[in-house]
Amino acid sequence: MTSIVLGLPKGSLQDATFNMMRKAGFSLSVGSRSYVPSCDDPQLRCRLIRAQEISRYVELGVLDAGITGYDWIYESNADVVEVAELLYAKQGLRPVRWVVAVPNDSPIREIKDLNGKRIATEAVGMTRRYLAQHGVNAEVEFSWGATEVKAPELVDAIVELTETGSSLRANNLRILDTVLESTTRLVANRKAWDDEGKRAKIEQVALLLSGALAAETRVLLKMNVPAAKLKSVSALLPALHAPTVSSLNDSGWHAVETVVEERLVRELVPSLRKAGAEGIIELPLNKIIL
């Protein structure tokens, strides 16, 4: 039985990744001081590693596959196979951004104003490439953390990761521009990807994770509808393809079910009830395989 070594991100993405893995069907557990999570799938040997390092270790073949951000793939310029884009982050199902930020009262208003300035960031390579694209010559230094508090006393500007912008605002910083938008990715080592057994396992993980993510924003609606109202009710229902309709033993009634975006339910349910649907049930979903 072929197994793979899978790198999981230690740090800000850890809890969200463990949650996604559980919804995908993989039960994980790890001690507070351990870097080797246990998994109920004997084909997965998981390792907890900083997201910044995962793509490099995947490229080297130390890991067969790993979950990390596109930003760190770009930063390290790693030669890996991007198997799947997984749209989740620490606080929600959205991309994150690397942004150039300066103090609110800074005279710096445009990127060109960074010429000759000092910038702190964890993503040095990304920042230097961005500045070069804009023809800006600035000093870029690596930041070991707490980057937001370094401006203006230590540096003129920072390039920092943000999901909502709240931390930047709390530190009296304003955003000048977006350097890079990033999403979570499942990546694979090229040699492992060419191995039939390993590729099959990596593709299985990708399929189940993608299915769990697809289900995050959707619910299953089930209802009973009299035959005379079936057309008007069905016309209200969005679906992946079309609502599923089946006849009930009670003549003249149908059971209808469909998958819809959860955000639509609060407006949809009253409309369905008004159109004639009864016994409406909303159910959460674990996975949707598209």
Image (cartoon, rainbow, N blue to C red):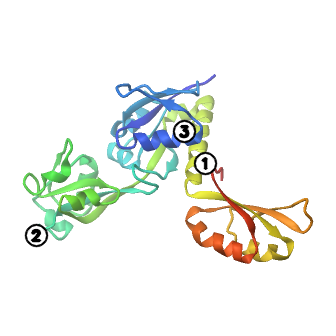
Give the CA distance from mark 2 to mark 3.
48 Å
Secondary structure found at label 3: helix
Left or right? Give the position of 50 relative to 94. left
Secondary structure found at label 1: helix
User: Hey, which residue is sitting farthest left in the picture?
Assistant: 153
Q: Which label number is shown at residue 268?
A: none
Q: Give the residue displayed 17% in from the left and 67% down from the top.
A: 112
Q: Which residue is mark 1?
A: 211
> What amino acid is found at the position of numbered circle 3 in the picture?
Arg
> What amino acid is found at the position of numbered circle 1 in the picture?
Gly
For the N terminus, the quadrant is top right
Total numbered labels: 3
In this rendering, the answer to whether 106 lies above or below 92 is: below
> What amino acid is found at the position of numbered circle 2 in the picture?
Pro
Counting residues from the start of the chain, the first of labels 1 and 2 encountered is: 2
Counting residues from the start of the chain, the first of labels 2 and 3 encountered is: 3
How many residues crowd mark 1 within 10 Å: few (<14), some (14–19), many (20+)?
A: many
The x and y percentages for residue 118 are: 12, 54
Q: Which residue is mark 3?
A: 22
Give the CA distance from mark 1 to mark 3.
12 Å
Q: Which residue is mark 2?
A: 107
Q: Would you identify the image quadrant in which residue 98 lies?
A: bottom left
Q: Would you identify the image quadrant in which residue 224 lies?
A: bottom right
